[in-house]
Structures are given as C-alpha cells and as structure tokens.
Image: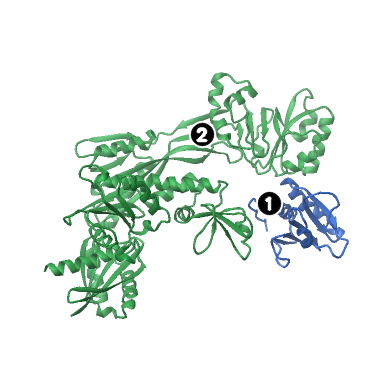
Chain colours: A green, B blue
C-alpha cells in the first residue's frame, strides 16, 4: 500500500513541508517544500502558504495534491515576544556651551582662547582683548582670510575661528598667522557672543588633548572644583574628537541626569520581587533568576518598559481572543547597552554615549486556535488534516535525524521574538522552555548602539558579513581577506563599510569603522543569543548543571545566521557539550525540523497502533 | 610633459579661459581636503587629463572642457571617468574637488546637490 503523508510546519516567517512516500509502513522517500507564511501564524490567511509549500514538495515527487492522504500540522507554540529600550542617563546643556563637533577637515592647529565676536564687529571691539571670530555663511573664504589678516595687521589678537561653511583649511592656508579653525558648525547663530571661548584643533592622527580633559577645561576657564565637576559631561562628550569648541556662559550649566525609568515587578511562585530599571540589567536578571517560575511581570505605568509590557499583553490577547487581564508575561530578558543620544541643547549635533537597558518580554497562552485552521484547510485542500504534537517535541524529533546526534538531545530554536528550547530525554520524554529575547532584540541592540534609527539596516548588519571597499577594484572582508573584481565598484560604495547581502551590497551610513560595527554585532549576539542559550540549558536541566547535556542542536531560521553556529559551538565546547547547526535528515540543514518531526511521529504512532 | 620638479598632486586641466573660474572652484574643494593641486591651461594636443592621471603621482586628474567637468583616475578606462558633471553649481564644483581628493585619501565621496 502506497501512502503520501505530509508534515507541515507553519512558522512565523516560512511554512515548511516534509512529504514522505510510505509503503507498508516504511518511509521510502522524503522531500521538502518551503513557502512564505501568509498572514500571522495561526490565522486563516495561512492556508495559501500551506498550499504553496505542499505543492512545492509534491512537485518534487511528481504527484498531485489529491494523492496526499494526510497532512499533519503543528500545534503552534503560542509565544510572543516584544522589546523596549529605556535610556537611564541623559546629558542636558542649558544655554549652549559646547561644540564637540568633529568636522572632516578643520583648519589650523593648536589651542586658541578668547572672547567670541562676529567677524564684522572685530573693528569696533577693544584691541586689548583676545578674540575668537564667529563667521556665518554669507562670507566667501577669500574675504574672511583677507579680513582676519587685515585685523591682525591692525593689532587685534585673533586666536581662533568658528565657521558655518566647510572652509577651515582654505581660510587657514591664506592666513599669515595660523589659528585653530573649527568649521561646519550648523547652528552658528546659536553661538553666544562676548563669551570666553576655547577652540582646539589637533594634528591629523591625534585627538584633542586639553578640552577632553576636565582639568584642561578648568585650566582654560579658571574653574573652581565645584564647576570642574559640572563640566565632566562636556569633556566626556569631546573624547576622541580632532577638534572642539567650548564656550563658558555665566548661566550655562551641564548636567548628567539619571532618568527615573520606573520599576519592574516580577511575581514569582511565592512572593513578589522588585527591581529598579535604572539599576541596570544585572539587577533585573537577578530577580528574574530568583523568581524561578514567573507568574507575571508588570512595570511602572508611564515608562517605556511599563508600556511595552502592556503592549505585549494586548497583542497576545487580540491574537488568542483571551481576556487581556488573563494574559501573563512568563519571562523577561534585560540587557545593558550604551546608546548615542543627541545632547540636549547642542549646536552641531553632538552626541553623548548614554546608558540604557533593553528589555524583552515573552507571553505564553494556553493554545492558539489551530483547530479552526485545520478544519478550513481540510475543506480547502480536500485532504484530511491532523494536528500533530507540540512544536518543541516535533522539532526534537526532526533534529534527531541530524547525523551524529543521539538522545538525550536538546534543540534550540531561536526565532525573532523568543528563544525556544526542548529537551528530549533518553526515554522519549520532552521538556520545553520558552525564553524572552531573540533575533529582534539583537537587531534592536545593534540599531541602538550604532545610532542607526533604521531597523531594516540593523537587521542586515545582523544577518550578513561586512567588508570595507578599499579601492575601486577591491574590498577587504571583515576577516582580512581581500577580494578583487574585474569591473569597477560603484562610486557610492567607495571607502565605505558595506554589508555583503547576496542580492546587493548595502553601504552602512556611519563614521564608525568596520571593526567597531563588527564588535557591536557580535556583542549583541552574545548578550542575547548566547546568554539565552545558557539560561535555557540551566532551566531545562534537572540539576541546574549545564554539563549534563551531551548534544545541543540549533534549528530554525536564526540558526542560518552566518556566525551564530560557530559562536555556540565555541561557548558550549567549554562545558563539554557537542553543539552546532542541525542537519535535518542529513540534507536539510537546520530547516524543516518540525515538519520532519510531524511526519516521523506519524510513522511511530501508526507502528504502535 | 612631466612636471619638471618633483611636484605631486592633482592637475586640473582647463581648455577655455571661460572654464577658469570653474577650475578654481574645483581646486578649492581639493585644497580643503588638504591635497596639492595645480591649474593648467590646455596647450599641447598630446596632453589629456586621462594621460595626466597615468603619470607618476596621485593618479587623479580633472579636465574641464566647455563647462563639462570630468574626473579621471588611473584605475579607470578613458571612456568611463569617475565623475562627469555638466553645468554644476559652484557648490557642486567644490564637491567634485572634494571627491577628486577623496579618491586619493580613501574617504567616502560626498553626494552632489543636483
């Protein structure tokens, strides 16, 4: 008797099929099909995706859909994740005092100290004082240079210049007496006049020395110890610049403020635990660990975190028709990060690195309504549909077809919103765990730390390797290898860091270098993926000892990540665990595990029967 | 044809006297980037910016002919100069100068305002 049975896994992104030809209870051939998931997982819109996926597989066996006698679909794990970012420090400058700006080509060299004055008004100022001239955009650089030379010849002491246009080098080249010049200052009209000011430009290849040092600023302006304490954020924001301007205004004040970010309350089995978000990730994770089995998590209303937790709750309630109040948050992941934030009250888009905490939450409900979907599918395809086992158990079963694995085995499926793990013990018992924090959170961290403001770009940085375009004909990959091309590389990529997407390269619009971007990417993955994998292992383990595991297999979309497999192998080998990307049925790589599991479990069940 | 001294920089070759001010604007862009440049009126028939780009030196040359600016670099074919600008504003001419210098410096190009 020949039978065609299919296992279909409806995932968040793709719908995968494992179609088997079964003769007398023996699986002869198994092929795979893959299609994009249509609509949100668990809804009626999925039907089209399921059909496409089945057709793709049926074509490989050369059969019609009508020949398939049974389709088994997975019982989707009703898990949703979401994340939020809460900045916990902020730098505020009341009445601007700082231009910590880093133009490509400042002019001159050295340090100049004097009172700020408009170029046109130098002639009417007192000749005894030292001046820093402020030049708006209506002047041509030739005239500026002439005028400064003239005034200096007349005996005025001009010690430095602040320009709106990118003319620093041009002006400096035409000056008889060289002065430091900071150019490209967007908000030139915001520069306070008649105030004591310091302009510093460092030689190419070095950084400003005096203005990035609190005591340096104190020396220039004659500050008291109390005032010196206040200007630390300025010095901090200027570190690493080639040029900078600091102006002292009488009422000016700079503050680094801690923003009240609210509290997180974790309801454990026995008692409530509380942690302040501005205490950082470690404090939050400590109460998450302490609570062990989490009943629910809430946050202070009116804060980002509080809002995010309620949003996850609402989203899940809508999806499952459950009462909003009954949806409970079952896990939380907090990660420390540093994000560039625009300094409030700046003149040239200065940024300061502020501390922030990224938080991901996970919600689990009883069940998604797969029965309704199964009925509709059955009507549409005219094939009988069966709901197979839980996703996790099916994934382990599929993963077990990876050559070189054996029971006990742990599968890890890192999705976009949550990290799912399932343990298969030697006696076929399964133990699933769902954790908050996965792919999307990594993307958020990359986007925030690089100050990108573009989720899709951060997603590309996460997924693909980087390279630096070094000439019109060659690039240097992030591992140092050089690749040459026959045709010239497009000029918009020249000298930029590019993401090597298979379909087309994408330049990263940032001044950060390749090493820094790579470091941010890997650190984000370590903070979320690796941390969660270790957390999952500890949760699944009966003894709490990670070393008791033998095999950890990565399946699902995120395991296609180009470096995650290696990062996991490296980390877990430390604990003596064999781990790596799965290779389902020895041919499918980390894909198709759940679908294969659905098909295989049918065989086992029919054998038992 | 080679510059007699050991000078090394970007030559801006212009054909008509009317192109002089354009050449000057391009030069300002190069100067702001800190690269030496020279303006040179076109005289001998054998000299082209393409050939200048192939002389020892930085490997970049600019040619301005009847209001059209072309930036050649040693690595590219004569038929495909790196930048071609027709009737650019003064700002665009400065940017072309910046970009010609940036080929040498290995810095990303600025976008034209066009």
Q: Return the residue found at the far top.
A: A224
Q: Nearer the viewer, residue A145 or A471?
A: A471
Q: Find residue A548 and report its horizontal and vertical position in percent.
A: 24, 46
**Few, some or many residues within 10 Å of mark 1 (<14, 14–19, 20+):** many
Q: Who is closer to the viewer here, A235 or A513?
A: A513
Residue lying furthest right in this view?
Answer: B43
Q: Quadrant of the N terminus of chain A?
A: bottom left
Q: Which residue is mark 2?
A: A91
Image quarter for residue A406? bottom left
* Secondary structure type for disc 2: strand
- CA gap, disc 2 to disc 1? 35 Å
Disc nearest the viewer among 2 and 1: 1
Q: Which residue is mark 1?
A: B102
Residue A57 visible to an observer of this rendering: yes
Q: Regarding mark 1 in the picture, which secondary structure is present there? A: helix
Instruction: Tell which residue pokes out farthest to the left in this image.
Output: A609
């Amino acid at each position: 008797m020949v039978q065609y049975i299919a296992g279909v896994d409806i995932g968040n992104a793709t719908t995968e099929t494992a179609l088997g030809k079964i003769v007398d209870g023996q699986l002869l051939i198994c092929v795979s099909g893959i299609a994009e998931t249509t609509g949100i997982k668990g809804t009626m819109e999925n039907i089209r995706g399921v059909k496409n996926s089945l057709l793709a597989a049926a074509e490989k066996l050369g059969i019609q859909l009508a020949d398939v006698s049974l389709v088994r679909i997975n019982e989707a794990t009703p898990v949703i994740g979401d994340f939020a970012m809460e900045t916990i420090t902020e730098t505020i400058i009341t009445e601007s005092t700082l231009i910590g700006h880093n133009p490509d080509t400042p002019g001159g060299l050295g340090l100049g100290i004097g009172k700020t004055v408009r170029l046109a008004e130098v002639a009417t100022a007192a000749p005894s004082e030292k001046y820093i001239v402020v030049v708006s955009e209506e002047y041509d650089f030739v005239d500026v240079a002439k005028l400064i030379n003239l005034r200096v010849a007349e005996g005025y002491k001009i010690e430095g210049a602040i320009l709106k246009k990118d003319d620093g080098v041009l002006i400096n080249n035409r000056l008889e007496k060289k002065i430091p010049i900071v150019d490209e200052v967007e908000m030139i009209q915001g520069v306070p006049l008649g105030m004591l000011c310091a302009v510093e430009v460092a030689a190419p290849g070095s950084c400003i020395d005096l203005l990035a040092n609190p005591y340096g600023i104190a020396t220039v302006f004659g500050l008291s110890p109390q005032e010196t304490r206040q200007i630390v954020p300025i010095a901090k924001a200027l570190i690493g610049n080639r040029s900078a301007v600091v102006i002292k205004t009488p009422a000016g004040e700079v503050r680094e403020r801690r923003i009240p970010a609210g509290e997180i309350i974790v309801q454990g089995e026995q008692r409530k635990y509380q942690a302040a978000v501005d205490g950082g990730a470690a404090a939050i994770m400590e109460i998450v660990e302490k609570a062990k089995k989490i009943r629910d998590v809430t946050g202070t209303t009116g804060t980002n975190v509080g809002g995010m937790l309620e949003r996850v709750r609402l989203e899940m309630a809508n999806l499952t028709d459950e009462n909003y109040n009954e949806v409970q948050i079952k896990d939380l992941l907090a990660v420390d990060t540093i994000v560039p934030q625009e300094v409030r009250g700046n003149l040239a888009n200065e940024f300061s690195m502020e501390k922030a905490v990224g938080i991901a939450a996970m919600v689990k409900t009883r069940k998604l309504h797969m029965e309704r979907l199964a009925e509709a599918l059955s009507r549409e395809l005219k094939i009988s549909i069966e709901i197979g086992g839980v996703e996790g158990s099916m994934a382990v079963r599929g993963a077990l077809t990876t050559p070189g694995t054996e029971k006990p085995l742990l599968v890890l499926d890192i999705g976009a919103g949550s990290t799912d793990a399932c343990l298969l013990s030697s006696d076929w018992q399964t133990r699933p765990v769902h954790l908050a924090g996965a792919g999307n959170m990594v993307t958020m961290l990359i986007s925030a730390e690089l100050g990108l403001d573009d989720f899709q770009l951060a997603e590309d940085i996460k997924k693909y390797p980087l390279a630096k375009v070094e000439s019109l004909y060659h690039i240097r990959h992030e591992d140092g290898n050089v690749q040459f091309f026959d045709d010239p590389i497009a000029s918009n990529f020249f000298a930029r860091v590019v993401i090597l997407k298979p379909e087309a390269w994408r330049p990263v619009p940032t001044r950060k270098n390749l090493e820094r971007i790579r470091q941010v990417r890997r650190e984000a993955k370590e903070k979320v993926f690796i941390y969660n994998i270790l957390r999952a292992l500890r949760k699944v383990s009966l003894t709490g000892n990670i070393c008791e595991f033998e095999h950890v297999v990565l399946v699902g979309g995120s395991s296609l990540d180009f470096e995650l497999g290696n990062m996991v192998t490296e980390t877990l080998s430390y604990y003596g665990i064999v781990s790596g990307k799965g290779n389902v049925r020895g041919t499918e790589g980390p894909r198709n595990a759940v679908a294969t599991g659905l098909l295989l479990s049918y065989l086992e069940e029919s054998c038992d029967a | 044809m080679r510059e007699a001294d050991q000078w090394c920089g970007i030559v801006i070759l212009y054909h008509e006297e009317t192109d002089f001010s354009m050449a000057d604007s391009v030069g300002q862009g190069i100067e702001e980037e800190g690269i030496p440049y020279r303006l040179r009126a076109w005289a001998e028939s054998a000299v082209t910016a393409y050939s200048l780009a192939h002389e020892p030196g930085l490997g970049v040359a600019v040619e301005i002919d009847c209001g059209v600016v072309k930036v050649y670099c040693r690595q590219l074919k004569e038929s495909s100069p790196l930048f071609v600008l027709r009737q650019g504003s003064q700002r665009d001419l400065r940017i072309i100068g910046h970009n010609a210098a940036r080929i040498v410096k290995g810095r990303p190009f600025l976008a034209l305002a066009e």
